[in-house]
Image (cartoon, rainbow, N blue to C red):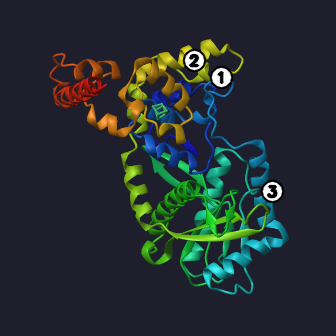
Amino acid sequence: MSSHMPSLSPGARRRLEEIRGNAPRPSTSVRTLAAFAHHTDCPMANLAFAAGVDLERLLVGTRFQPSFGQSPFAFQRGLAFEESLRRNDYAATLDLLRTALGDPLPSPIVVNMRNRHPKNHAGMALRWQDTRQLLDRMIRRDPGAPNLIDGAVLRGEVGGLEAFFEADALAARALGAIRVAEVKSFPKVDGRVDADKLGAAVDQVAIYLLLLRRIVAELGGDPEALVSVEAMLITPLNVGLRPTLSVKAVGPRVVRAEKVLAAVPRAADVIAAAPAGRSFGPIADRNADESRRLHSLEVLADEVGTMYRPDCLANCGNARFCRSQARCKGEPALLGSVAIRLLPGVATLGRAEELSRGVAPTAAEAPAAALLAGAGRLYDEVAGASATAV
Ligand code: SF4
């Protein structure tokens, strides 16, 4: 994601740069946004997102570096696969589209946006302008409009900031709805794609579709008629690089994406609430000692606040660090969302154990304490009966 700050004051913009420091920036795909969408209730994740910090790379070089990044092998395979889709004037990609779009596309028009402009923020803004013009031609049924745009850039507003996102492909037949295609290098084997990876990929397409619908509406088109709610996923077949296409309806995910984007806190508010003088820079500094980097993160996390849950491990780069902190503090969240729901107001698992032995609760602990005391009595009865039987 590439963003700039049209709605931020110069002071807030300066503070945002300070908070980010030299920390790595996230990519321009919606993968970052889709991953963040699971954690909009976490103040630390909100601060990193507003400041444009890539949490997947923040802790690289420390013992808490995340393990879900792509291996170099998978990365190379992904590049080779993408390259194969562009070979011979996109021959393999167009073959897939002919089937998916139900159109022989006798004279397909393909536009490659990837190398038109510099790979920086200004370049993304120019690619967005070009994409917008092409989309305008597509929705006006211009005979010269493209059937396939490789590397289109869509614009959206997230947390009050303008952001640009690079979509793998937008495709349309001559008189049909526009579709979003996402290219992934994980394989389709025996007609099936890994369910978790498929779910993450179609969540990303749902965000692209949402942005696309908004742009089509801005251009005066009817999003219902002009934007398909089917995601097209292009993946390799088995272990080779032969591409195959999966199509999945994602209407409900588009609705969910809209709610998630609306719930992202405004960056200006997040920045205003950030502790003075703190920055992600010292945490990201790979020349510094690990202990100094982690100490900086501990201080920031304590001041800003976190909201650890086991599902952080699937999609937040700070998860190993936050799990370690949660273990040190004995947080109920370690046991998952059910424990969080059952133990409102109980700060630690140690305190839950005390309450299960009938210790007097505080007012905040009272609802959970009644359940815990009951469970404690039940446990004592069962344990007592077992001991008598022996
Ligand atoms: S891992 Fe930590 S920073 Fe990331 S969402 Fe979870 S609690 Fe927040």
Q: Residues within 10 Å of mark 1 (few under 14, many from 20)?
A: some
Mark 2 residue type: Leu
Question: Viewer-proximal residue, 237 or 169?
Answer: 237
Disc 1 to disc 3, C-alpha distance: 30 Å
Question: Viewer-proximal residue, 157 or 194?
Answer: 194
Q: Do the residues labelled 2 and 1 touch (CB within 8 Å)?
A: yes
Could you tell whether 8 is left or right of 314 in the image?
A: left
Disc 3: which residue: 80
- In terms of sequence position, does the residue under pointer 3 or pointer 2 come before the other? 3
* Residue 363 screen position, x and y as percent: 14, 22
Choose top left, top right, bottom left or bottom right for residue 134: bottom right
For residue 174, above or below residue 279: below
For the C terminus, which image quadrant? top left
Residue 62 numbered tag: 1
Residue 294 numbered tag: 2
Residue 344 numbered tag: none
